[in-house]
Image: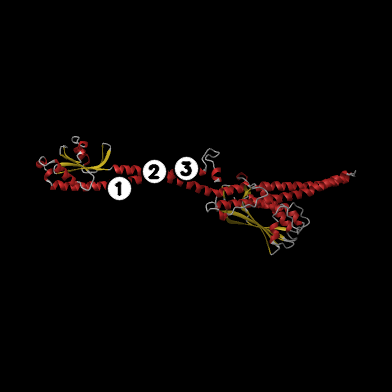
């Protein structure tokens, strides 16, 4: 019950907790149901007693009519001549087997005879029987006389009115006791149901406590703690799966961040150590001016390398945060790629490498400065990995693909779900100097990774293809790097058309 105790009725925002809201709603439903059940049972029992009493009264009325027909004592001419004892005996025979009270009056309501005799004074009010006849007319009704309860009926026969009353005090006592017991039973059932519901909700929320405890224990040293999905109820399994997926992403990102921190520390340590060593050597004694100038050139190259590394890291951070809608503009891919090809053409000429562009390059949607850096990195890597006297093929084609969660609309990218989108697919293909496997190619996108088969002229930070991946992802595009026949290196990128 620890979870139940931890869930206070009032949340921090002033609203009832989910547990108490569930209990109160269920309690209200149970109470309303119990009220309807109580009314239905009470009405059913009352209807049962009324039906039984109506049958007794009907049978008694039938017997009374028979005796009134077969005995002349009820005739007007003989009533005064017969003794009262004979009239009482006849009336008693008429109501035999029933504990009914009977009063017979004339049409004016004057009491002629009653059984028992003491009942005459109770019903001797002038025209009372006649009024009851006019009101109910041989229909059963409830009657209270001197705090006693009767179910009665008034019949008319041979110009006489007869009131037949059946005592129902026992019924009232039984119903009163039955109602008390019924109320106690329904109240007990209500409390039992509410308790069972509260306990069930507590058990239902117990897995949430497991998730909460695991989330509270999340730290950098413990990112491998997972929830056993099979132990969760079916309703919470998607939540458990999402939690495990989140932890997998968190562990992967934390591992990448740790590895990135180690890599950048290693990358920065070497040039900084070089600068420090060179400075200490130059300060150890006086030197000629040309030595200082030469050393300043070396330090300038090292600082340029550091600056390039820092700029690349800032670019990675910018692209990994994603781009907002306002940063997307219409960019002419043909003009931008041609500009980059002209810029890198002089580097390619030193190794007799040429470019060949085919296909129709259309207008794409994105950030022009980032796309320029994208094409520059792809061309630079293509040149560095290409064999001498080879051709770098650059082709373009329009393709349609599903873009999960994104759709282009009026120059902006908005949310959607698996909507088809049009891409401009650009493929860079070059012939390698030495063969490479697909496993080696896959590592090229890792940060600070430098392949041992690259040319000695390639001096870089190892972030070129990492930046390419980041820029493509920031533009909601797709990229694939493959090697065919161990010698044909191919980079395929898909960018959304404007």
Across and down, in percent, residue 372 comes to 68, 49
Q: Which residue is mark 3?
A: 24
Quarter of the image holding residue 296? top right
Q: Which residue is mark 1?
A: 48
**Which residue is label 2 attached to?**
183
- Depicted 458 relative to depicted 136: above or below: below
Farthest-out residue, bottom = 485
Residue 407 image position (x, y, % from top left): 56, 50
**What is the CA distance from the residue labelled 2 to the residue labelled 1?**
19 Å
User: Does label 1 or label 3 sit earlier along the sequence?
Assistant: 3
Mark 2 and 1 residues: CB-CB less than 8 Å, in contact? no
Closer to the N terminus: mark 3 or mark 2?
3
Q: Give the mark toward the camera: 3 or 2.
A: 2
Q: Nearer the viewer, residue 84 or 260?
A: 84
**Residue lying farthest top?**
126
Q: Earlier in the sequence, mark 2 or mark 1?
A: 1
- Colour option used: secondary structure
Q: Mark 2, residues whose alpha carbon is within 10 Å: few (<14), some, or many (≥20)?
A: some
The residues tagged by marks 3 and 2 sit, at their Cα atoms, a distance apart of: 20 Å
Q: Is residue 381 visible?
A: yes
């Amino acid at each position: 019950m620890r979870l139940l105790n931890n869930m206070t009725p009032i949340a921090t925002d002033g609203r009832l907790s989910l547990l108490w809201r569930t209990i109160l709603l269920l309690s209200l439903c149970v109470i309303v149901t119990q009220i309807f059940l109580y009314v239905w049972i009470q009405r059913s029992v009352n209807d049962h007693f009324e039906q039984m009493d109506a049958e007794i009264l009907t049978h008694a009325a039938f017997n009374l009519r028979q005796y009134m027909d077969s005995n002349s004592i009820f005739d007007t001419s003989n009533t005064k001549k017969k003794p009262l004892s004979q009239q009482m005996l006849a009336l008693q025979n008429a109501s035999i087997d029933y504990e009914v009270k009977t009063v017979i009056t004339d049409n004016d309501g004057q009491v002629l005879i009653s059984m028992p005799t003491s009942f005459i004074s109770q019903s001797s009010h002038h025209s009372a029987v006649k009024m009851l006849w006019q009101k109910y007319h041989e229909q059963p009704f409830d009657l209270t006389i001197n705090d006693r309860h009767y179910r009665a009926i008034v019949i008319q026969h041979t110009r006489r009115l007869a009131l037949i009353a059946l005592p129902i005090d026992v019924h009232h006592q039984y119903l009163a006791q039955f109602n008390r017991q019924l109320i106690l039973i329904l109240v007990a059932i209500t409390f039992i149901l509410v308790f069972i519901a509260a306990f069930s909700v507590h058990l239902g929320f117990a897995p949430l406590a497991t998730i909460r405890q695991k989330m509270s224990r999340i730290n950098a040293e413990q990112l491998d703690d997972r929830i056993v999905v099979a132990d969760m109820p079916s309703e919470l399994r998607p939540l458990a799966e999402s939690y495990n997926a989140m932890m997998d992403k968190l562990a992967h990102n934390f591992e990448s961040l740790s590895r990135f921190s180690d890599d950048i520390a290693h990358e920065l340590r070497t040039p900084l150590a070089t600068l420090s060593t060179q400075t200490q050597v130059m300060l150890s004694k006086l030197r000629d001016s040309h030595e200082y100038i030469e050393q300043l050139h070396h330090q300038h190259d090292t600082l340029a390398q550091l600056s390039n590394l820092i700029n690349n890291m800032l670019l990675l951070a910018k692209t990994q945060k994603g781009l907002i809608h306002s940063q997307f503009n219409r960019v002419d891919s043909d003009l931008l790629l041609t500009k980059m090809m002209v810029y890198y053409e002089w580097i390619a000429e030193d190794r007799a490498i040429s470019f060949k562009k085919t296909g129709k390059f259309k207008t794409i949607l994105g950030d022009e400065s980032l796309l320029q850096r994208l094409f520059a990195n792809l061309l630079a890597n293509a040149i560095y990995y290409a064999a001498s006297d080879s051709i770098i093929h650059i082709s373009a084609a329009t393709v349609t693909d599903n873009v999960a969660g994104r759709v282009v609309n009026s120059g902006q990218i908005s949310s959607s779900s698996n909507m088809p989108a049009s891409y401009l697919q650009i493929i860079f293909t070059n012939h390698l100097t030495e063969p490479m496997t697909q496993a080696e190619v896959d590592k090229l996108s890792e940060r600070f990774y430098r392949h041992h088969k690259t040319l000695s002229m390639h001096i870089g930070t190892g972030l070129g293809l990492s930046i390419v991946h980041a820029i493509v992802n920031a533009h909601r595009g797709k990229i694939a790097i493959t090697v065919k026949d161990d010698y044909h290196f191919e980079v395929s990128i898909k960018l959304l058309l404007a």
